[in-house]
Amino acid sequence: MKPLKTLITAGAFAACAVTMANAQDISGAGATFPYPIYAKWADAYKKETNVGLNYQSIGSGGGIKQIEAKTVTFGASDAPLKGAELEKEGLVQFPMVMGGIVPVVNISGVTPGELVLDGPTLAKIFLGDIKNWNDPAIAKLNPGAKLPSQAIAVVHRSDGSGTTFNFTDYLQKVSADWKSKVGSNTAVEWPVGIGAKGNEGVSNNVGQTQGSIGYVEYAYAKQNKLTYTKMINKEGKTVAPTMEAFQAAAASADWNSVPGYGVILSDQPGAGSWPMTAATWILIHKQPQDSASAASALKFFDWAYHNGGKMAEELDYVPMPSNVVSSVEQTWAKDIKDAGGKPLYALSH
């Protein structure tokens, strides 16, 4: 397998996509947030089963469009669809893995985890109200730090993005100004900044632009050696983006409280919680056009749930809890069927 950094910075799915060689191969499209772990799982699964995964890392918006148009076996989104849309489109939705969204900066002399931000200050930066790195609000959070007078270059997503949905959901929870002026969605009217496509594009832009700030899934920050910030969470505690902090945020989630397991994990309570934690979901039709491919996809997801946890943790993703996996697999067995009404997944665990 190529080094993961190569996979991520390639900015395309080609590095892990496998040429469609047989009917069992699986096609999917969507979120860039989970792409690093989907690539890693795909490589291991191909070696073990000779079944390939062709995943297009195009953003959640694109993934939703493709699954609704039935051009792929599954879609992937970090912004969960609501119950009414799932019902209308005949889709089953389930969470695959969790991770953290982190602010990343490119400031000369500042090392990863050295700079501390809080939610209101982060919102003011992305609103354009804070324009320079030595602004008093940033300086107050970082006493003793040598902050340059350099202008802040904001980098945001240009495509429909579940990462944006979760990032803006957090900002609207901590900033009344953000909530009233911008709000939260997969795509918003950004007050300032330049757009880049995918977590890959934001990573590349921040890496190349002095004075910049952006937001990416943590694996991209880590593998591309970007400078991430610490955050002050809901409890007023300064936390670093770690798997333990992501797990802490997910600990109190009630996954069955929302249709399609659509729980939003931003700004969760808990002294150790990372404030921008998020899940990522898979979308698949209840009655797929290609039953063989859908059954093959469910086998892959089953394998990932039961064999992919360690690989996920190596990239600082958080595997889904076993009780959630059990509930999801019961949903598969009950709801996903071929044209004749036969279930495409049989419970075996």
Image (cartoon, rainbow, N blue to C red):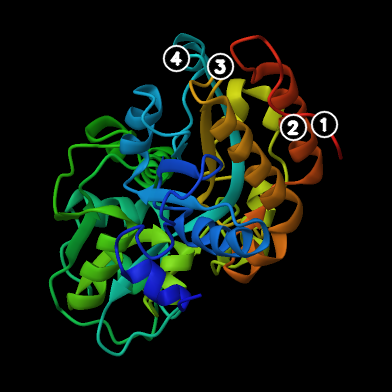
Residue at the spot 72% in from the left edge and 41% down from the top edge = 252
Label whose residue precedes the other's in the sequence (3 or 4): 4
Judged left or right of residue 51, residue 206 is left
Q: CA distance from mark 1 to mark 4?
A: 25 Å
Q: Give amino acid for label 4.
A: Glu
Task: Give the amino acid type for the residue marked by disc 1 in the picture.
Answer: Leu
Tell me the CA gap for discs 2 and 4: 20 Å
Label 3 SS: loop
In terms of depth relative to the viewer, which is nearer, 6 or 179? 6
Viewer-proximal residue, 24 or 183? 24
Dot 1 or dot 2: first in sequence order is: 2
Q: Badge 1: how crowded within 10 Å, few (<14), some, or many (20+)?
A: few
Q: Are marks 1 and 2 in contact (CB under 8 Å)?
A: yes
Give the numbered dot on residue 347: 1
Q: Position of residue 121 (x, y in %)?
A: 33, 57
**Residue denoted by label 2:** 329
- Kind of element beneath mark 4: helix
Q: Which residue in the structure is indicated by mark 3?
A: 287
Residue 46 lies in what quarter of the image? Answer: bottom right
Q: Nearer the viewer, mark 2 or mark 3?
A: 3
Residue 190, image x and y in percent? 18, 44
Alpha carbon of mark 1 to alpha carbon of mark 2: how far?
7 Å
